[in-house]
Amino acid sequence: QVQLVESGGGLVQAGGSLRLSCAASGSIFSINVMGWYRQAPGKQRELVATTTAGVTADSVKGRFTISRDNAKNTVYLQMNSLKPEDTAVYYCNVLIATMRGGSLYSYWGQGTQVTVSS
């Protein structure tokens, strides 16, 4: 079993900052890629950033930064200069091998709400 626990969401005024965290625990042999997605109301889930590609969403480049702490199996998303259009549920996604030579499986966090007020 693998668990992903997200934290750090909340309500912030435009121009403010938040840092999201996602910690993986359980039957983990190795972690491959870690990333963040977001889904705004009425919109499809979109990729924001991964630990291999960096920030990929054009709308947040220069404002968001992804980082990873391998010792803690944790991925972070630092969000600065937040805008109302960044309002969404943010999900972490992690590719994990549970045994040596095993397949990679995709796991999702429970989601954390980020609301940016104007």
Image (cartoon, rainbow, N blue to C red):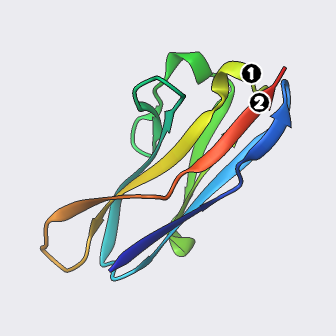
Q: In the figure, 97 relative to 107: above or below?
A: below
Q: x, y (%) of residue 63?
A: 69, 26
| Residue drawn at 49 percent across, 33 percent down | 39
Q: Is residue 79 left or right of residue 59?
A: right
Q: Which residue is mark 2?
A: 116
Q: x, y (%) of residue 12?
A: 83, 37
Quarter of the image for residue 79 reads top right
| Residue drawn at 49 percent across, 23 percent down | 57
Viewer-proximal residue among 39 and 28: 39
Viewer-proximal residue among 61 and 25: 25
Q: x, y (%) of residue 5?
A: 54, 67
Whether residue 80 is visible: no
Q: Is residue 22 left or right of residue 53?
A: right
Number of the front mark, 2 or 1: 2
Q: In the figure, 45 relative to 108: above or below?
A: above
- Judging from the image, what secondary structure is the residue with disc 1 in? loop
| Residue drawn at 41 percent across, 32 percent down | 45
Quarter of the image for residue 74 reads bottom right
Q: Which residue is mark 1?
A: 83
Mark 2 and mark 1 residues within 8 Å of each other at the beta carbon: yes
Amino acid type, residue under disc 1 in the picture: Lys
